Amino acid sequence: MIRSAFIALLALTTTLQAADLKIGVIDMSKVFQEFHKTKSAAEKYKGNYEKAAQEMQERQTVYKNLATEAQKLQKLAQDPIITPEQRNKYAAELGEKVKEIRSMEMEMQEFAERRQTQLKQEDMQIRKGLYEEILVVVRDKSKSEGLDIVFDKTGVSLSTVPIILHVKEGAAADLTDQLIVELNKNAPPPGAEPAKEAAGEAKK
């Protein structure tokens, strides 16, 4: 499969050279990282992650308190000094406390899985939105530069080797830095509150 893809790429390159097309390359990884909305989105995601961690910490605190209460009840239920009626009473309370603990364990596991899924989906949605916004600028820039085809020079094959192994200097226009300037021309001043639509609202 990799060999077929490589042959296809060579054939495409030969065709492009024969047609004397204008080719451009972009370091999409660099563009994505330097896009000001990527940075604000990363901050928003970090905030949501920390909020989820705090919520889990709160549950863990409740769980520890329940465990402490259960240990106290267990000691009381095993106290040889108190009456059998009292021991039975504490044993019954212990049983209820153990049920609370088991229920809390299930709730914590479900919460962790749910929030992990939400954060993953949010990250994918944010990335998709940012890439779509970048691609609009890529297409507009490519048209203004009169380019026939543009490659992402950070793209890799199935063997994780870069698809574009070499580009002769001057043979392709590198739009990377121009794109970064274009994408960041409306960036808010340092310290300003980023626009909410930049990162997208997290789905609860």
Image (cartoon, rainbow, N blue to C red):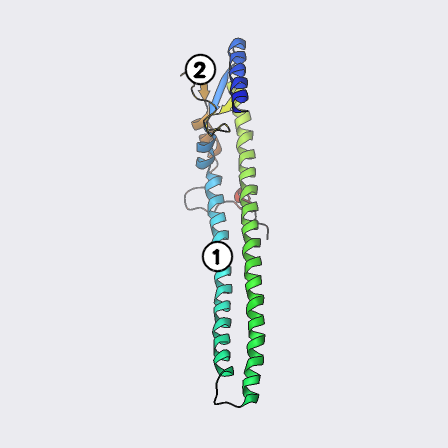
Q: Are marks 1 and 2 in contact (CB under 8 Å)?
A: no
Where is 33 relative to 106, above or below? above
Task: Label 1: state its secondary structure.
Answer: helix
User: Looking at numbered disc 2 in the image, what kind of residue is underneath it?
Assistant: Ala
Q: Position of residue 174 (x, y in %)?
A: 44, 22
Residue that badge 2 annotates = 171
Q: Is residue 106 left or right of residue 65?
A: right
* Quadrant in the picture for residue 89: bottom right
Residue placed most toward the observer, 14 or 196: 14
Q: Position of residue 136 (x, y in %)?
A: 56, 30
Density class for disc 1 (Cα within 10 Å; few <14, some 14-19, many ≥20) is some
Q: Residue at x 50, y 11 (%)?
A: 17
Where is 99 relative to 16, above or below? below
> Alpha carbon of mark 1 to alpha carbon of mark 2: how far?
50 Å
Q: Is residue 30 left or right of residue 136?
A: left
Viewport quadrant of the N terminus: top right
Residue placed most toward the observer, 113 or 153: 113
Where is 177 relative to 81, above or below? above
Can residue 134 be seen in this snapshot? yes
Residue 53's disc is: 1
User: Looking at numbered disc 1 in the image, what kind of residue is underneath it?
Assistant: Ala
Q: Which mark sits nearer the N-terminus, 1 or 2?
A: 1
Q: Residue at x 53, y 42 (%)?
A: 198
Task: Label 2: state its secondary structure.
Answer: loop
Residue placed most toward the observer, 56 or 24: 56
